[in-house]
Image (cartoon, rainbow, N blue to C red):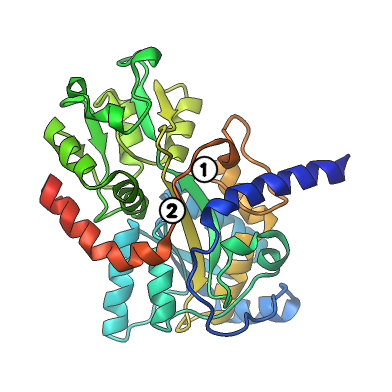
Amino acid sequence: MRTKEFSRRAMLKASSASALAGVFAAPLAAAPAPTAVDPTLIAAARKEGSLAFYTAMEIPIARALAARFQANYPGINVRVKRSGAERVFQRIGEEEEIRIHEVDVVCSTDAGHFVRWKRDGLLASYVPEDVARHFPPAQTDTDGMYATAFALLSPIGYNTNLVKPDEAPRSFADLLDPRWKGKIVKGRPDYSGTILTATFQIARELGWSYFEQLAQLQVTQVQSASEPPKKLAAGAAAVAADGSEPDLLLLRQQHAPVEPVYPSEGTPLVIAPSAVFRSAPSPNAARLFQSFLFSAEGQELLVRASALCSFHALVQERPGRRTLSSIKLMKSDPVAMEAQREEIKARYSRIFGQG
């Protein structure tokens, strides 16, 4: 019976992964053999004593990961450096320019960053054992430079005290109804990797005319993907045009009056890879942390504490949330998104104004 349950779960994760098939950069060479955590790696990591984790994760979950890792491996401190994904990308670029290497491990909600970093030769090839054994091939770089640490959705949301369920928007097209004028909140792609990914996918599917029409409705602009759900919960907006589904689900669990809507056109899917930097000051601690992040323990923490989605075959979905396989998804395409990043930001700013 246990084998049957595992097979069904693996099949569901594989079907979800099909929306991402073929989206990582083309291989440069054969991927390295997977690396298991052993006493030699642990001892080398303890000798280094610390690592810097650059991430776009919300601070509570990033700190929870760091705390669990430090409990498992006493003597190795994790310095969490958290910001919006686009700010993380900018900071790393600035550090590279002046030859200051501080980042050991990076996890970003803009998967296009990893396409760029790989192309520029900034990533180390490292395949944790769990990635090789339990993750779909579609979620791993063919050269072993990075893999998908988690995924999330960017749906529509609404405040159930301000909007009746039968009157809530069911599609992106519904958001263009004049009755929502002055009642919509959304994030910005020049700060948030989640919002940049959503903007790219929506513009690809619906065209930029969608955003041009949306901008006529006096949309409230906020920075991060976590802010639209918080504005909804506070009653500061009736509808969110985008935002982080995990934040919506956690707020709903806390009895906030919020509800996600998975648009009929498809819901933007955001994948968040993680990688070890080639210039990592603490390369062994970085590899140990990367292995922990992709372990069943690390992935379970992401799912349970933050309602994120994991592609680890042994990690179950969080109770009370819809599976990715049951939702119509927009296709992730980090390669195309990386090529269009600056154009997306510039065009968005021309439509909605500077943030």
Q: Secondary structure at mark 1?
A: helix
In whole angstroms, how far apart are the C-alphas of marks 1 and 2? Answer: 10 Å
**Residue flagged by tag 2: what amino acid is it?**
Met
| Residue 253 seen from this side | yes
Residue for point 71% across, 72% down: 37
Residue 20 in the image: state x and y as whole percent. 52, 56
The mark nearer the N terminus, 1 or 2, is 2
Residue 40 numbered tag: none
Q: Position of residue 283 (x, y in %)?
A: 54, 81
Residue 159 is left or right of residue 324, and the answer is left
Q: Quadrant of residue 48?
A: bottom right
Neighbourhood count class around disc 2 (C-alpha, 10 Å): few under 14, some 14–19, many 20 upward: many
Q: Secondary structure at mark 2?
A: loop
Q: Amino acid at mark 1?
A: Ser
Residue 251 at x, y percent in the picture: 44, 30
Judge whether 317 appears above or below 192 on screen.
Answer: above
Q: How many marks?
A: 2
Outermost right residue:
1
Q: Is residue 56 above or below residue 157?
A: below
The quadrant in which residue 147 appears is bottom right
CB within 8 Å, label 1 to label 2: yes
Q: Which residue is mark 1?
A: 306
To which quarter of the image does residue 293 belong? bottom right
